[in-house]
Image (cartoon, helix red, strand yellow):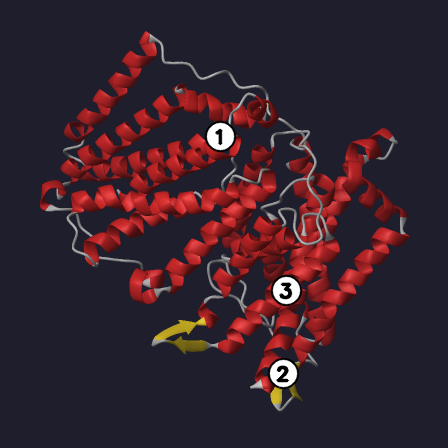
Amino acid sequence: MLASLAVQLLNGLAGASALFLVAVGLSLIFGVTRIVNFAHGSMYMIGLYAAYSLVHAFGVSAIGFWGAVFVAALLVGLLGAAIEIGVLRRIYRAPELFQLLATFAVVLMLRDAVLYLWGPEDLLGPKAPGLKGAVEIFGRSFPTYDLLLIFVGPLVLAALWALLKKTRAGILIRAATQDREMVGALGVNQKWLFTGVFALGSALAALGGALQMPREPANLGLDLIAIGEAFVVVVVGGMGSIPGAYLAALLIAEIKAICYGIGTVTLFGTSFAFSKLTLVVEFLVMAAVLIWRPWGLLGKPQGAVRAVAAPEAPIRPLPRAGTIAAIAVVLALALLPLAARGTPYMTVLAIDILIAVLFAASLHFIMGPGGMHSFGHAAYFGLGAYGAALLLKAFAVPMELALLLAPLAALAGAIVFGFFAVRLSGVYLAMLTLAFAQIVWSIVFQWDEVTGGSNGLVGIWPSATFASKTAYYYLTLAVVVAGLFMLRRMLLAPFGYAMRAGRDSPLRAEATGIDVVRVHWAGFAVAGLVCGFAGAL
């Protein structure tokens, strides 16, 4: 038992090095540029794909293998520099949300480019020459290549420490991390400094991906998997803290390794498969750290964001012409099934669009007037959808009643998650909401007996009253119009003004007697409830 646990801990050390290489680049980029780079996971993925192609071009030899690894890292570093120059350099002073969306757009473009260049198949690279075997540790076989990976993380950490402490470039990077405006005022060319840091961070992520060539196949889902794990590590360690990234990588990797080592445990007749809870565990750790220490283990509280959006025009009731136009749009939508008699798919597409509109409106309610950057809003959509499906299948509840009750699951989730989330702001709020969403997704994805796992719940059909596409369309239209009307009325009510006051100037709002945390918590819950209706539909 102890021997097996020791080997699992060694596996955790190897995994920690891989996590650290990805996370440290993300942490370095954020520390200097203050941009949360969603495209960082794409650098990891492209590094693995590039190494696969290069090793076959160079030949499967020691020189060819290691040459492919380092050349792939170099090429992806240049790609990162090009992205910084072409995209990010223009948005450093843009609002934070705009920066996040821009880097997410880069993720989508790079994924399509990878699909075009390498195709959809998984590509597994060759074993490292000279490191194909295993050594015996505590009577168990342990891959020689993983032993090498254990030492890669500390070596990179030491190299980065030397770079930051012993070189002029490192001093400038540390200075920019503290106050980039002051660095620019002293005559340092910030443009090239930012480009260099972005290239270095991208190269480190690509190096982490290339080193995984013998261990996991290159596939199109690696970008989001890598960025999700990197976010966990960086947020737990502290945004911008390199030692914190390594400490967090060790913590996360070892906890996951212990879960694998424990396996399945039966308590009071119930089996708990800890090996299936690794996704839940890492995001639970992230959520716990953010609640206990919002800036991470070794991070520092963030200063005020200097890039702010232009003042928004106040929300006012629609003028008479606007009201007439809104009524006309609703009437036109009500007549759509009549115009689509010859093309029934148009009705199905319209239903999907209406559901998406309600989902987007609920997200805008907290991100726009509320000013809360939620990356986990889809969790409430899923809670509403699974709530309705389980009520129908497991409890044989009529569809109409299930449609009314299912959003309560989303409301409950939003109340619980929002209680912790509204106490944070900026990047940490976004990451905590992402953590909660990943926890929900992990439970749903791995709880096969209840949720159907990756297959989901099938065989869910409307009741006889709404069995036809036209009837279901009118039901959807009614729910969506009611939801939009409710959100609009709330924004024009004193509650909406209080929520926007807490967004624009929380200190002044508190001084006037507004409980900003409670108002934002209520707004978070309302948005979750409306999103739950979209999911239930």
Left or right: where 516 falls relative to 316: right
Q: Residue at x 55, y 48 (%)?
A: 110
Residue 277 in sight in this render:
yes
> In x, y percent, where is residue 338?
14, 28
Q: Nearer the observer, disc 2 or disc 3?
A: 3
Q: Along the line of sight, which residue is nearer the eye, 369 or 215? A: 369
Tag 3's secondary structure?
helix
Quadrant for the C terminus in the image: top left
Which image quarter: residue 153? bottom right
Q: Along the line of sight, which residue is nearer the eye, 523 or 515? A: 515
The disc, 1 or 3, on the residue closer to the chain's N-terminal end is 3
Circle 1 is placed at which residue position?
A: 370
Q: Which kind of residue does numbered mark 1 sit on? A: Gly
Circle 2 is placed at which residue position?
A: 142
Tag 2's secondary structure?
strand
> In x, y percent, where is residue 253?
60, 66
Q: Kindly indicate whether the residue at mark 2 contacts the one at mark 1 (C-beta within 8 angstroms).
A: no
C-alpha gap between disc 1 and disc 2: 52 Å
Q: Kindly indicate whether the residue at mark 3 contacts the one at mark 1 (C-beta within 8 angstroms).
A: no
Q: Nearer the observer, disc 1 or disc 2?
A: 1
Left or right: where 52 falls relative to 389: right
Q: Which kind of residue does numbered mark 3 sit on? A: Leu
Around disc 1, counting alpha carbons within 10 Å, would you say few (fewer than 14), some (14 to 19), or many (20 or more)?
many
> In x, y percent, where is residue 296?
65, 51
C-alpha gap between disc 1 and disc 3: 34 Å
Around disc 2, counting alpha carbons within 10 Å, would you say few (fewer than 14), some (14 to 19), or many (20 or more)?
some
The disc, 2 or 3, on the residue closer to the chain's N-terminal end is 2
Quadrant for the N terminus in the image: bottom right
> In x, y percent, where is residue 143?
63, 81
Q: Residue at x 54, y 37 (%)?
A: 101
Circle 3 is placed at which residue position?
A: 251
